[in-house]
Image: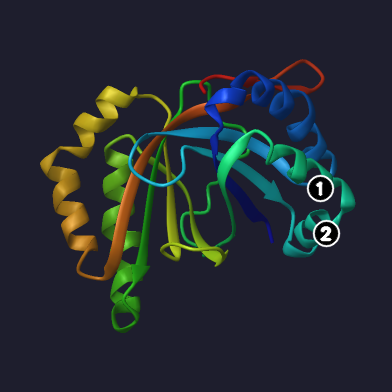
Amino acid sequence: MPVKFNQYWTVDFDKTKEYEKFVIRKYIPGINKLGIHIVAGWTVLIGGYSENILEGISNDLELLEKALRDIKYRQLNDELQNYIKKYKTKVLVKTGKKDEYSKDIKKNTVKFSQTWDVISKYKDLYERYVSETYYPCLEKLGIKVAREWEVLIGDGPRIVCEGRAENIDSTTLISNLQSKTFQKGRQGLKQFVENYESRILTFHIQKVLGYKSASYELIAG
């Protein structure tokens, strides 16, 4: 079963240039070779938490554990710490709802990430509501729900709803999130969840598909 490995950090302002060279030329290629496929890097446009998020996928938990124990990963991660601050990680597994995740993300995608904890006594009502009402509401607003994840290792709310807005810009996305349609849908969700948070993300690092292979391009610091 695929698992997601997210890394969170803030770049040390005084080492921006060195960071850019390292993360593109050495860190991402090295992580990919270990079996953790880097999908994209994101920067938080609106919302709290860490400034940058590196999104990786492994085929299963056993392979991820093997990669994280590898001396090469430890060496890469130790070197990364020279250029960043406030480093965190999370391991996420899919819940089985809205399973349309793809490792190939369109060029102008904006991500709308929501997190929450399900109130246990409302679990059945929650599952019915998100499947029949809330996730279809997001789709109508141009937000494709790629996958619902559960945090297996790491802090924060346990459920992560990964939404991708592929055909609208951040201004349109914000306008849609201010609509009565979204506000009504979110209010309904909040009957069944707690610790709700949301953030809008734009590309920090983008995978560029070439004729024979993919490369990575740093978009924003």
Q: Write the residue at 34% across / 22% down.
A: 169
Residue 60 x, y percent position in the rendering:
74, 60
Residue 125 x, y percent position in the rendering:
28, 74
Between residue 37 and residue 31, name the one nearer to us: 31
Residue 79 x, y percent position in the rendering:
76, 38
Mark 1 is surrounded, within 10 Å at the Cα level, by few (under 14), some (14 to 19) or many (20 or more) other residues, namely some
Furthest residue toward left:
180
In the shown orientation, is residue 145 left or right of residue 89? Answer: left
**Placement of 71 over or under 96, stated as above or below:** above
- Quarter holding the N terminus is bottom right
Residue 220 x, y percent position in the rendering:
51, 21
**Placement of 61 over or under 14, stated as above or below:** below
Res. 208 visible in picture: no
| Numbered marks: total | 2
Between residue 87 and residue 47, name the one nearer to us: 87
User: Disc 1 and disc 2: Cα gap in Å?
Assistant: 7 Å
Looking at the image, do the residues carrying marks 1 and 2 touch, with CB atoms under 8 Å apart?
A: yes
Res. 61 visible in picture: yes
Label 1 SS: helix
Label 2 SS: helix
Amino acid at dot 1: Tyr
Residue 69, labelled with which disc? 2
Residue 73, labelled with which disc? 1
In the shown orientation, is residue 221 left or right of residue 176? Answer: right
Among the 4 quarters of the image, the one containing residue 219:
top right
**Placement of 215 over or under 133, stated as above or below:** above
Amino acid at dot 2: Arg
Q: Write the residue at 69% across / 36% down.
A: 82
Q: Write the residue at 68% across / 38% down.
A: 38
